[in-house]
Structure formats: structure tokens, C-alpha cells
Image (cartoon, helix red, strand yellow):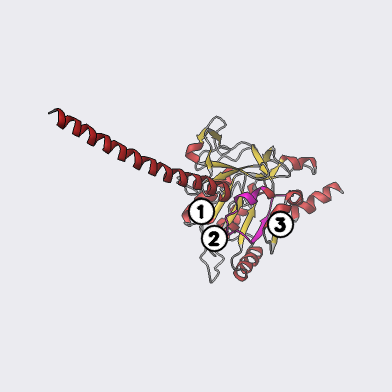
Amino acid sequence: MLLRYHRNLRLSSIFIDEIMKLMKRYLIVIGVFFLFYLFVSNKNRLFPRLVFGEFHLLSTESNRTINIRQSQLYQHESSNGGIITLYDVTQDNEWDFQCPKTKYNEEDIHDVKICIYDPQHDEHVSGQLNDHGKWEPVVVRSFLRLLRTLPNTHVIDIGANLGLYTLLATQYDRHVIAVEPLYDSLIRLHKSIQLNDVQHHVTLVANAIGIKHERLSLNIVDKNLGASYLSYLDELAPPVKKIENIVDEQHGIPPRVLAEVDTITLDDLVSIFPIFFKRAILKIDIEGFEALAFSNASLLFNRTEIPAIYMEFGKLIEMKYHRD
């Protein structure tokens, strides 16, 4: 009996030793994979870090918040020290927006569904897309022609707004870095990305582009939400009429007039470019801030081939007229 007990004890000891050896072996493998995960997430933004806490929605009552673990906003620190806020477009979006289909009728790509504002509150972009399925048709067709002729060329969409250029570019299987600070537009763009099933073609950034890292107010323009602009520009030109109340009749959502946004520079974006992102068309429409934004873009132009820039000049001309 005693002999059997010792034999069982020895077998148990051997079994435990083997289990411990296996555990050590697997721990080494897990450790190697974890280090690889950290390296990839730091270099290529494939696994950005989750930010915990609460995020105040511009599109809701001032006392309503959404948990960031639900909205899945992520942060990535650039090599320049900027904190880039990334919006996870792979999450579910249950908002019920009006999402008409574009009508560019290009032969080689499909038109896209694009989620818009109530045209009563956004007469220009949303109104034109709702009534005609088009916005800036001449410029958009020029943009699409250029994409056709430039293979392996992706897109940087600064001031993406509702994402018209972003969504159309994905139809050519291009990757888009889309930057849009207005949360109302972000959730609509997210819904559009989901409806068109292009989640893996878009990196969505929830910052504004500035000249340095700071927090600024975003002013929302009456009847033209795409013309929202950073308060910094009020020092350079007379402020335009800001919106007072754009209650969404369908959802009963009264947005605030101002949103606080964190700025990053164009150079900060380089740190979130995927490995294959070597050449890109730059589209920039940030309501008069374009020239200032280029003051911190040397790294972007040194690291990335930019064969073309689509840029709005109207606001810059208007600001120059007011200064003169």
C-alpha cells in the first residue's frame, strides 16, 4: 500500500513537471507574440490603444455622454508628440440617417451611399447630394480621373466632412486617411463606410488639423455645416454667422454651437500611415486654414510622394479680401 502511494506520488510529480515545462514553453511563445503585437501596433497603427472614459457628443444634449469603450475612439502618439484620436469604423453604427446614393454614373466604379444632414440645416453639400446625388461634379470627376491614371496611389482627405471623396476613392480599392473633427459628420461618415462595406479601406481621424498641438473651439456655420472652422480664424477675418439651433426633427437632437477639438499637424499623420502608403493624392478643405496647415507638413512631403493636391481657395481669397 505504501509502495503504491509513493509510486503515485512520483507519477504525479512527473506529470506536474511536464505541465510546468509546457507552460513555460507556451509562455515564451505568448511573450514573443505579445512583443510582436506591441511592435506592429506602434509602427503601423493596426492595433491602436483603447482610450477609457467618456466622450461628450456634440450631437446630443449638453448633459449626455457616451462611454468611449462603446464609441471606440483610440489614441495614437505620433513621433512629433501629437495625440491622434482614431475612430474605429469597424464598430456597429445604429444611427438611422438619410443616406441617398450618389449619381456620378462612372463606368468603372459603383456609386456610393452617403449619409447626410437634414438639407434644411445643411443646404449646400447635403442639399445637393439629396436633390441631385452630386456635389462639386467637375472637381470630383477630375479627382476620379486622376485616381484611374495613378495606380497604387492612395488618398489623404483633410476636412472629409461627410466623406464624399473618401467613399468614392475606396471604390478604386485605395486606402484613405480621412480627417474630420466634427463628431456629427464622423458618425454619418462611419455609417456610410458601413453601408458601403469599406471599413478596411478607411482610417478615420477625429482631430482638427492645426499649426501646433492645442485645444481649440470649432465654430459651426449656419446652413452650411461643412464650413465649420477653427475659432483661431476669427482673429484673421470677421467671423461668419454661427448656428444657433439646428435641432434634428427626426431624432430630436439639439447640437451645441461650439465643440472643443484637439489639433494635430499634417506631419503627425505620417505615424499612422500603413506600410504600403507611399504615394497619395492630398485633398484639403479646412475653411481657410490650408496655408497655415502647410507650415508643419515637411515630414509629410518628405516621406510621401504627393502627385496632386486638391485644395479650396475660396475661403483664403475671402480672408485676404477682408484683410485688405
Precedes in sequence: disc 2 or disc 3: 2
Instruction: Report the amino acid beneath label 2.
Output: Thr
Residue under label 3: 302
Precedes in sequence: disc 2 or disc 1: 2
Q: Which mark is residue 133?
A: none
In-front residue for pair 295/216: 295
- From this viewpoint, is residue 205 visible? yes
Residue 14 vertical placement versus 100 (above, below): above
Q: Residue furthest front?
A: 3
Q: Residue furthest right?
A: 324
In screen coordinates, is 117 left or right of 267?
Answer: left
Query: Label 2 vs label 1: CA separation?
Result: 9 Å
Residue under label 2: 170
Residue under label 1: 193
In the image, which residues are magenta?
268-287
Instruction: Report the amino acid beneath label 3.
Output: Asn
Q: Position of residue 201 (x, y in %)?
A: 53, 57
Say which element carries label 3: helix
- From this viewpoint, is residue 98 visible? no
